[in-house]
Image (cartoon, rainbow, N blue to C red):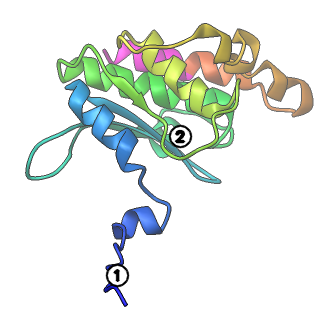
Amino acid sequence: MKNKRQVIPFRRKREGKTNYKKRIAYLTSGLPRLVIRRSLKNVVVQIITYEPQGDRVVASANSKDIKKLGWKGSGSNIPCAYLVGFLAGVKAKGAKINEAIADLGLYQQIKGSKIYAALKGAFDAGLKIPLDESVVPNAERLRGKHISEHRKVDAEKDFEEVLSKIKGAK
């Protein structure tokens, strides 16, 4: 009987956390990655560069930063995701990063989702990111009109106030 060797994949691949084929493609591009991650209550956007010792976070923003600027709504809706992406884009421009590639992770990519709202925010902040406008939520959803119609909160007004604070902080 032949002696068969069993190849055990990397731990992060076994756990379904990392797609190494995509990761190597991102790293060989030579561009910083715009990493967008979401949870039930927060959205996190980071600009990460590769270094041999390990990845380095150059700029980062999350929903908690937006709440400190006056956002009264949820930390995980579409307008908040856009603002988080915009803030991360502004911080990246401050760190002299002008171009990035989107790393959306293992999330199912759904047209009009908050992941694309965050990507649009970073794009509007001035980062050069490959982006197809057909997958981005429409402008009314980005500004929170759909929230203002169903809640007693004026999400559009909060959105404009926070956006002006972020633009003023440039």
Does residue 35 appear to the left or right of 41 in the view shown?
Answer: left
Q: Mark 1 points at which residue?
A: 4
Distance Cα–Cα, label 2 vs label 1: 56 Å
Q: Which x, y percent locates residue 66?
A: 50, 35
Q: In which quarter of the image is residue 140?
A: top right
Which residue is at a point 36% across and 68% down the rendered structure image? 9
User: Which numbered marker is on residue 67?
Assistant: 2
Decide which of 125, 131 is in the foreground and name it: 131
Viewer-nearest of discs 2 and 1: 1
Give the quadrant of the C terminus.
top left
Q: What's the residue type where badge 2 is placed?
A: Lys
Q: Quadrant of residue 151?
A: top right
Does residue 76 appear to the left or right of 2 in the view shown?
Answer: right
Which residue is at a point 74% across and 19% down the rendered structure image? 141
Q: Is the magenta stretch mostly helix, strand or loop?
A: helix
Which residue is at a point 65% across and 24% down the rendered structure image? 158
